[in-house]
Image: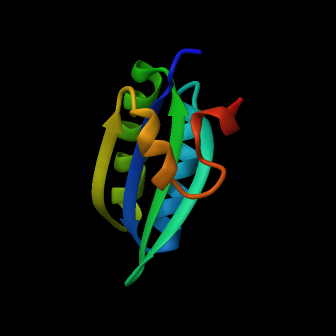
């Protein structure tokens, strides 16, 4: 099984996170894995797919979210190690995406 990239866009506030999620799934062939409320108003939206698609999606999501709110962080992990799957929110592992 080929590992999929993991892309994350973290925003301050839910509205920006929803805008980012919408832009990400519309701009590239990625699967929206969900979101995680971090605390202090921070929300992280996560997508999976091939590296190029995830990079394009996170770029589009960050641009869209920044138009209506604050983007805190954007990151793509091209091939997350299997051990990383253990700390992802429940249901966000690569095997759950299939």
For image coordinates 42% across by 44% down, the residue present is 84
For image coordinates 40% across by 40% down, the residue present is 58
Relative side of 35 to 69, left or right: right
Vertical arrangement, residue 16 with respect to residue 39, above or below: above
For image coordinates 34% across by 37% down, the residue present is 76
Of residues 39 and 57, the one drawn nearer to the viewer in this rendering: 39
Residue 18: percent from left, percent from top = 56, 60
Of residues 24 and 67, the one drawn nearer to the viewer in this rendering: 24
Q: Which colour scheme is used?
A: rainbow
Residue 57 in view here: no
Q: Quadrant of residue 5?
A: top left
Relative side of 10 to 14, left or right: left
Q: In which quarter of the image is residue 90?
A: bottom right
For image coordinates 58% across by 48% down, the residue present is 22
Relative side of 80 to 45, left or right: left
Q: Quadrant of the N terminus?
A: top right
Counting labels gives 0
Residue 38 in view here: yes
Kindly give the residue lying farthest to the bottom in the view shown. 40
Vertical arrangement, residue 53 with respect to residue 22, above or below: above
Of residues 33 and 26, the one drawn nearer to the viewer in this rendering: 33
Q: In which quarter of the image is the C terminus?
A: top right
Vertical arrangement, residue 55 with respect to residue 33, above or below: above
Residue 32: percent from left, percent from top = 61, 43
Residue 19: percent from left, percent from top = 52, 56
Residue 21: percent from left, percent from top = 55, 50
Relative side of 33 to 44, left or right: right
Vertical arrangement, residue 71 with respect to residue 98, above or below: below
């Amino acid at each position: 099984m080929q590992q999929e990239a993991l892309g994350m866009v973290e925003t301050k506030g839910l509205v920006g996170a929803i805008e980012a999620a919408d832009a990400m799934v519309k701009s590239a062939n990625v699967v929206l894995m969900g979101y995680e409320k971090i605390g202090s108003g921070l929300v992280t939206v996560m997508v999976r797919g091939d590296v190029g698609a995830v990079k394009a999606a996170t770029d589009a999501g960050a641009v869209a979210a920044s138009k209506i709110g604050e983007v805190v962080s954007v990151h793509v992990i091209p091939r997350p190690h299997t051990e990383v799957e253990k700390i992802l929110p429940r249901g966000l592992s690569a095997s759950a995406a299939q």
